C-alpha cells in the first residue's frame, strides 16, 4: 500500500470514499466496545477467585505476630503482607506501609500530606506561592488530575524510550526550588510501555534538587506485569540506588495488587526510607487505626509467597499477551506503510501508545466513538488534557475479549486512515488556496 | 461504709494501710489486662465469622446494577451497600458514600479536604490565619488528634447528660466566624454514653453560624449499639432535621461497621446533603477510583438487610451487657457511699465514664498500670490530653473477658480508693500546715 503522504489529491479522494463506505459498515454493527481504561478482563479477574476461598468461618485470622486481623491495630500493615509486598516491590518489608484498596489513594494522600504538613519538617506546600511538578509526557491522566486538583503547576518533560529526558529533569530540579516532585511510571510506563534504562534510574537517584522537599513519585504500577516470560524489562531498584547515591530520602514508591488480584478489592503499598516512613507515620496515626488487615491476610494466604505471585502473573500474561499482539499486528497490517502513525510495542504493562499525524488524535477518537468504540480521551495523556500537537492516543487492549478487540482494532485503524486522509486532503486544499 | 470525705486523719491513715495491703495483693497477681480502648472482644468478633463464608470462588460478585465488584468503578459505593448503610444511618442511600475500613479515615479526609479546598467554594482553611473547632468534653481523643494535627484551635464545651451545652455552642458559633466545626458523638457518646436530647438535636439543626463553611461533624459511631432491647435511646435524625430547619448543608455524618463486624475489615460511610455530596465527589474522584467493593458486597450478603443487622447487634449486646453491668455494680458496691467518684450508666455504646475527685485521675490510672491494668490515659478525653481538673477516666469494658474484667474493676476501684484517701489526707495535712 502506498503511503498516504505520497498520494495525490485524487488518490486521497478515492481512498476516502472507500474508507467512508467501510466506516458505514462498522456503524451498522452497532458496537459497544471499551478500550478506554486499563481494566482487567473478566477472565483475568477469574484467576483470583481462589482468593475468596482461602478464608472461611473456620479460619484462624491471627497473623504471625499474634495480632487478630479482625480487630484494631497494626497501623503499617501485618508483617506477612509487608514481606509479600516487599518481595513484589523489591524492598525491605520494614520500609513498607500497607494501605487499603488503590495505590491512587496512597498517592493522593501523599500529595495531600506534603500540601498540608510538608516533608520532613519543610514548609507545607499550601503555604507556598508556587509549587511545580515535572510531568513526563505522555503520562497517566490520574496522576495529573491529583496535581491539578492541588493547584500544582505542571511542567511537561518529554518521555523517550529510556525514560524522561534526564538532561531536562536534572537542569530543572537543580535550578528551580519550587519544583517539588516528578511523576514517574518507571516500568512498562503508562501509556507507552517504556521502561527506564539503568542510566535513567541512576541519574534519578543522583538528582540534586534545589528543593530539599523534592520527591520522586515512583509509581511502579506494572512492576510484575510482564507479557513475555523470557523477554522482560529489568529495572534498577530505586530506593536501593538512592541509598547508594547518598540520597536515601528522595523517593516515595507506590504499588498495588489492583491488576494482580482485584482492582475492586486489592491492597496498596508505599515503600520509602526510614526517615520518610517516620514522617508518614506521624500523619497516618491520626488518619486511621489501620487499614483492612483481613484482606491483607487473604492476599498472603492466596499467594503464599512471591513465587506464587509470579506464577499467577504468568497466567495474566497468557491472557493479555495475545491481545497486545493482536492490536500491534492489526496496526502493522493496516497502517504499516501508510506513514500516518507510529506506536509502541511494549513487553509489559497495560497500554499501547499511538501517535497520529499532528492534529488528528481528537478526530480519530471521536470517529471511533461514533462507531461505538470508546478510546481514552485524546489529550488525556497530557497535563490538563491538553496535548499540544494533538497526536497521542492511549490504547488499552486488556478489557475486551479477543474477538471484540479484533473488531475494535480494525475500526480504530480505519478511523486513523479516514481522519488522516481527510486531514491530508484538507492540507492540500489549504496550501493550494 | 463511711464517706472518705467525712473521715478523720486517723481514719484515712488506717484505711490507706488496709488499701495498700490489698493493692500489694493485686500486684502479686502479675496482671496484664487492658481496659484502654473500645475494642470488641474475641467472642464479639466470632459473631461475624459467617461473613467469611458468604463469598467463595463460585460466588457471582456482580452487584445489582451489573457492576463486577472485582473490577474498577462505583466511586460512591455499590447500591446495595448504600441501601444497607442508609438503613443503618437512617439516611437516603443517595446521600451516602461508602468508604473503606475505618470512619476515622473518612473524618480525617473530610477535615483534610476542608483544609486544602474549603467547603462549597469557601476559602480553604489552610489559607486562614485561625481555624477553631468546638470540642464537647469529655470527648473522643482521636477526634481531637485530627484537629490538633491540622493546627486547629480547640475550644472545650461542657457535655451534659442531654448533649453539649447548647447555649454556649449557639453563642460561640454565632459570634466567631473562625469557628468552623464541632465534633459530636450524638448517641451513646464517647466516653459518657450520653445521647443528645431531642431539644439538643433540634438546636443543632437550627444553628446560625457566622461561618458559612461551619459544619457539624456528627460521628454516629454507636447508633446501633444498644445494650438493652427494651430500653434504647432514640435520636432525631440530624440530616432530616437540618433539612426541615432550612439548613440542609450543615452536617457531615459518619458511621461504620467497625464495631458491628470487624474493626480490622469493616466498611465506613459518610452521609450528607446533595450539595455537600457533589463537593466531596469533586475531590473523591481524584483520590480514588473506588473503595473495596467486594467487602461491601460481603457485608450486604452477610446481613441481608437492616433487620439482619439489628438481630446481629442483639448478639453483641448479649455479650457486652454483662460487662457493663459488672463494672457498674462493682463501682456501686465498692465506691457507692465513699463520695470519691461518680460514673455514668449508659444504655449503649462502648464506654463508662468515671469522674474522680479533682486532681486524682492521673494518679489512679498510674496506680492501675503499676498493678497490670491499662486504662485509657487520663486526660485523653480532653483536647491536647489536658483535663484541667484531672478528674476524667474512660473505662472500656468490652475487650477483657468477664472474669478478667471482674479483677480489673476490683483493682480500679481499689486504686480510686487508695489515691483518693491519700489525696484527702495530703489535703488535710496541707490545710493544717
Image: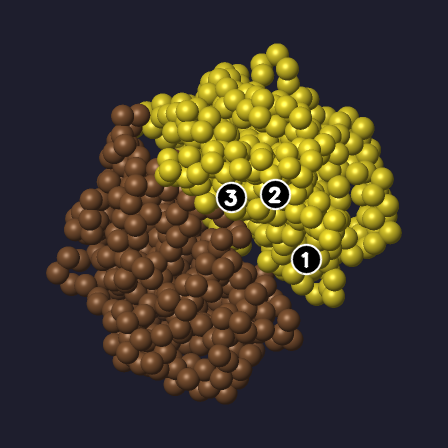
Chain colours: A brown, B yellow
Q: Tell me whether marks 2 and 3 sit on the same chain.
A: yes
As drawn, the label of residue A391 is: none
Q: Quadrant of residue B88?
A: top right
Image vertical order of residue B253 relative to residue A315, above or below? above
Q: Can residue B221 be seen in the rendering of this structure?
A: no
- Read off the residue under disc 1: B152
Mark 2 and mark 3 residues within 8 Å of each other at the beta carbon? no
Horizontally, is A45 left or right of B74 in the view? left
Q: In the drawing, what numbered circle is on residue B367?
A: 3
Q: Earlier in the sequence, mark 3 or mark 1?
A: 1
Query: Looking at the image, which residue is at 22% across and 44% down?
Result: A303
Residue A182 visible in the current orientation: yes
Q: Nearer the viewer, residue A159 or A290?
A: A290
Q: Chain of mark 3?
A: B
Residue shown at 21% from the left, 67% from the top? A234
x%, y% of residue B279? 65, 48
- Between marks 2 and 3 in the image, the one whose residue lies nearer the viewer: 2
Q: What residue does disc 2 label?
A: B422
Amino acid at each position: 500500500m502506498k503511503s498516504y503522504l505520497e498520494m495525490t489529491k485524487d488518490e486521497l479522494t478515492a481512498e476516502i470514499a472507500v474508507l467512508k463506505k467501510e466506516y458505514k459498515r462498522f456503524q451498522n454493527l452497532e458496537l459497544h466496545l471499551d478500550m478506554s481504561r486499563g481494566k482487567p478482563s473478566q477472565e483475568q479477574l477469574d484467576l483470583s477467585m481462589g482468593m475468596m476461598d482461602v478464608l472461611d468461618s473456620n479460619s484462624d485470622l491471627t497473623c504471625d505476630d499474634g495480632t487478630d486481623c479482625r480487630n484494631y491495630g497494626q497501623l503499617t500493615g501485618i508483617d506477612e503482607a509487608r514481606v509479600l509486598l516487599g518481595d513484589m516491590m523489591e524492598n525491605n518489608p520494614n520500609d513498607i506501609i500497607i494501605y487499603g484498596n488503590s495505590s491512587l489513594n496512597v498517592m493522593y494522600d501523599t500529595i495531600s500530606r506534603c500540601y498540608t504538613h510538608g516533608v520532613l519538617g519543610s514548609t507545607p506546600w499550601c503555604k507556598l506561592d508556587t509549587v511545580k511538578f515535572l510531568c513526563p509526557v505522555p503520562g497517566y491522566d490520574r496522576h495529573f488530575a491529583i496535581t491539578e486538583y492541588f493547584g500544582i503547576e505542571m511542567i511537561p518533560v518529554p518521555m523517550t524510550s529510556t525514560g524522561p529526558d534526564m538532561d531536562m529533569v536534572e537542569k530543572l530540579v537543580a535550578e528551580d526550588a519550587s519544583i517539588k516532585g516528578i511523576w514517574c511510571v518507571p516500568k512498562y510506563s503508562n501509556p507507552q510501555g517504556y521502561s527506564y534504562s539503568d542510566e535513567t534510574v541512576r541519574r534519578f537517584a543522583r538528582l540534586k534538587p534545589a528543593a530539599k522537599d523534592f520527591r520522586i513519585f515512583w509509581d511502579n504500577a506494572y512492576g510484575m506485569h510482564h507479557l513475555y516470560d523470557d523477554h522482560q524489562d529489568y529495572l534498577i531498584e530505586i530506593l536501593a540506588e538512592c541509598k547508594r547515591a547518598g540520597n536515601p530520602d528522595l523517593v516515595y514508591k507506590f504499588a498495588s495488587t489492583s491488576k494482580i488480584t482485584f482492582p475492586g478489592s486489592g491492597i496498596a503499598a508505599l515503600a520509602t526510607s526510614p526517615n520518610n516512613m517516620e514522617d508518614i507515620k506521624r500523619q497516618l496515626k491520626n488518619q486511621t487505626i489501620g487499614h483492612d488487615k483481613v484482606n491483607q491476610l487473604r492476599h498472603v494466604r492466596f499467594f503464599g509467597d512471591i513465587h506464587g505471585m509470579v506464577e499467577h502473573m504468568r497466567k495474566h500474561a497468557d491472557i493479555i499477551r495475545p491481545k497486545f499482539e493482536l492490536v500491534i499486528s492489526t496496526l502493522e497490517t493496516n497502517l504499516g506503510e501508510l506513514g500516518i502513525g507510529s506506536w509502541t510495542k511494549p513487553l509489559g504493562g497495560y497500554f499501547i501508545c499511538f501517535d497520529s499525524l499532528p492534529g488528528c488524535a481528537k478526530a480519530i477518537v471521536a470517529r471511533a466513538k461514533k462507531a461505538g468504540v470508546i478510546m481514552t480521551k485524546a489529550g488525556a495523556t497530557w497535563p490538563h488534557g491538553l496535548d499540544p500537537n494533538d497526536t497521542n492516543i492511549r490504547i488499552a487492549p486488556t478489557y475486551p475479549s479477543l474477538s471484540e478487540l479484533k473488531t475494535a482494532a480494525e475500526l480504530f485503524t480505519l478511523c486513523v486512515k479516514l481522519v488522516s486522509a481527510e486531514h491530508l486532503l484538507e492540507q492540500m486544499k489549504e496550501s493550494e488556496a
